[in-house]
Amino acid sequence: MNESDKRLAALAAVEEVRAGMSVGLGTGSTAAFAIEALGERVRGGLAVQAVATSLATEAHARAVGIALIDLPARIDLTIDGADEIDGALRAIKGAGGAMLREKVVAAASARMVVIADGSKRVAAIGAAKIPVETLPFARNFVAARLESLGAEVALRANFITNQGNSVLDCRFAPDIDHRRLAAEIAAIPGALGHGLFLTEVSAAYIATNGVVTRLER
Ligand code: 5RP
């Protein structure tokens, strides 16, 4: 991972923000660069309203002067990181454990832009663990269902989400049918959200060795 590439990708995405927009703010170290850059523009006079995908992002946004609102029915633009992203703009998210709110915000967004350094760009998603936010009461049941779908499941240790839930990190065969898998996970009672973002991403800015590439759906 390359911090200056993360920053470059974030700066490119924040250029898309226009006055009056509602902006979804992602979670993680790359999204943090976007929050910094947006804060700078806001302090320079840009008026936006933002929705935070986690408590950490909320605190960061407040600290840099970005006005926050409750989730509206529609968000103009969301900027978020990813753990893996491929050329078809399919992504795996949730290493930071914020994938449930991130998915809600992505679904509400007219445009979702992923920002990443080149280490996140893959030929096809599937090597990264897919996290599943799970109602603690249903943890063993959900884990068994995920295993029956072919996962090696590990409870994320010493971690609860901002909603007070558990995370089950799942390792699936990389060549599994992700579309089908996403539907199967979503159908498990007690599984509240997962890190497969197959259709939400509109564009990505990926920076490698100082060069930013934009992928557009
Ligand atoms: C959090 C996420 C993050 O966006 C993802 O894990 C990437 O994080 P980072 O930019 O720190 O590598 O999905 O739930």
Image (cartoon, rainbow, N blue to C red):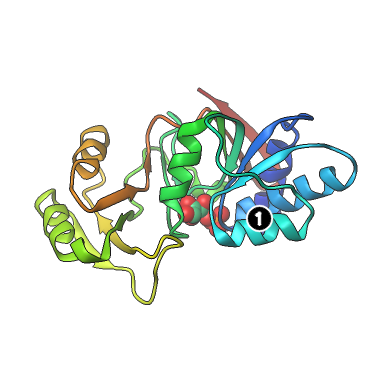
> Residue drawn at (75%, 53%), measured in percent from left and top?
36
The residue indicated by pointer 1 is 32
The quadrant holding residue 113 is top right
Q: Going by the image, does 173 lie left or right of 53?
A: left
> Residue drawn at (83%, 49%), measured in percent from left and top?
40
Q: Nearer the viewer, residue 56 or 120?
A: 56
Position in image of residue 16 (x %, y %)? 72, 30
**Label 1 within 8 A of ligand 1 by Cβ:** yes
> Residue drawn at (18%, 55%), measured in percent from left and top?
151
Q: Going by the image, does 165 lie left or right of 22?
A: left
Q: Nearer the viewer, residue 144 or 122?
A: 144
> Residue drawn at (83%, 43%), measured in percent from left and top?
41
The quadrant holding residue 165 is bottom left
Q: Going by the image, does 31 lie left or right of 174?
A: right
Label 1 is placed on what type of residue? Ala
Query: Of helix, strand and loop, which one carries label 1?
Result: helix
Q: Going by the image, does 14 lie left or right of 167?
A: right
Looking at the figure, which quarter contains the N terminus? Answer: bottom right
